[in-house]
Amino acid sequence: TIPVIIDCDPGIDDVMALTLAFAHPELDIKLITTEAGNQTQEITIHNARTFTSYMKKNIEIARGLDQPFFRKLETADDVHGENGLGNVEFPEPTIQVSNRPAIEAMKETLLSSDEQIILIATGPLTNVGALLLAHPEVKSKIKYISYMGGAAVGGNMSPTAEFNVYVDPHAADIVFRSGVPIVMSGLDVTHKAYVTLEEIKEIEAIGSDFASKVAKMLRFYIYSAKQTAFHAPGFEDQIHLHDLCAVSYVLTPELFEGDDCYVAVEIEGKFTAGTTVIDYAQQTGLPHNAKVLHTVNREKFVEQFIDAVQKMSL
Ligand code: BDR
Ligand code: CA
């Protein structure tokens, strides 16, 4: 099995990413931590608990930080809805909030593990940044960070910044300068990792309560993304499953292609705060700190996702 910790801000595509992780027993999910991002901490931890309980998984869920390092929290409630899950409701959770705060839980999980752990991060990097600052001794226990965030070309929150980095660029800066290897699923690859309305119908046809909830969330996501800058032009009947890439890469790296690069995070800038600057041309001469993904086998990726929904419907 592959030991992982998942740090997330659910979020419609975050729960799709959890679905894929839950469907694959070869992933040993040691811990789930939440943070503010798509919605406030209150809502993201509630969603992590309700969703994980509904999926009948018994995993520790720990509460992370409520606010970005310095910037005022900007949520994406316009894209993910008031409840963060496209207003699709799940039953009351059976899993309680862990009595360990997220940073402590992450530290203890990493330090007590014999094997290196992969950290999957699908929200702003607030928790991970705080962990690496407070407890640098955990670094050697992290195999790599599979991160959804950033963009080489074109943002979704500003001309050049992607949402997760934009929300907490200071935390992202700490993580990218930490020396821990990073696989970056930025918009360059996630915009190629979409599902179509036709495929959503296929999911609905599975016929389970879960499949119908997934279809509802994805329809909401298509609709809301259409109204916002979150949507790339020409994507009217399809929606990007951004966060799913970070889990899919861990399971099936062969579905993806990318380049090793030096990546810097712009923490300030009139137009560019929250931008990941990808040094493709090696202008800085600085050593590579990330593999920046740019290509995915969409057909296999969607097949993997639909299989996961089917499996979790049983
Ligand atoms: C990222 O922003 C969030 O809204 C999504 O959950 C994803 O993590 C995409 O830019
Ligand atoms: Ca997310």
Image (cartoon, grey):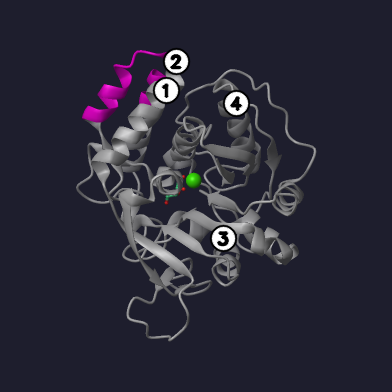
The residue positioned 63% from the left and 19% from the top of the image is 92
Identity, as a three-letter code, of the amino acid under mark 4: Lys
Of mark 1 and mark 3, the one earlier in the sequence is 3
Q: Label 4, secondary structure: give it.
A: loop
- Label 4 sits on residue: 57
Of mark 4 and mark 1, the one earlier in the sequence is 4
Magenta residues?
198-215
Q: Are marks 2 and 1 in contact (CB under 8 Å)?
A: yes
Q: Which mark is residue 314?
A: 2
Residue 70 occupies quadrant: bottom right
Q: Are marks 1 and 3 in contact (CB under 8 Å)?
A: no
Identity, as a three-letter code, of the amino acid under mark 1: Lys
Distance CA(mark 4)–CA(mark 1): 14 Å
Q: Quadrant of the C terminus?
A: top left
Left or right? Give the position of 141 relative to 212.
right
Of mark 3 and mark 4, the one earlier in the sequence is 4
**Is residue 303 in view from this perspective?**
yes
Nearer to us of marks 1 and 3 is 1
Nearer to us of marks 3 and 4 is 4
Residue 144, relative to residue 280: is it above or below?
above
Magenta-colored stretch includes residue 33: no
Q: Are marks 2 and 3 in contact (CB under 8 Å)?
A: no
Of mark 2 and mark 4, the one earlier in the sequence is 4
Distance CA(mark 2)–CA(mark 4): 14 Å
Distance CA(mark 2)–CA(mark 1): 6 Å
Of mark 2 and mark 3, the one earlier in the sequence is 3
Q: Quadrant of the N terminus?
A: top right
Identity, as a three-letter code, of the amino acid under mark 2: Leu
Q: Which mark is residue 32?
A: none
Q: Measured from the top left, where is residue 119 in percent x and y?
A: 57, 51
Q: Which mark is residue 168?
A: 3
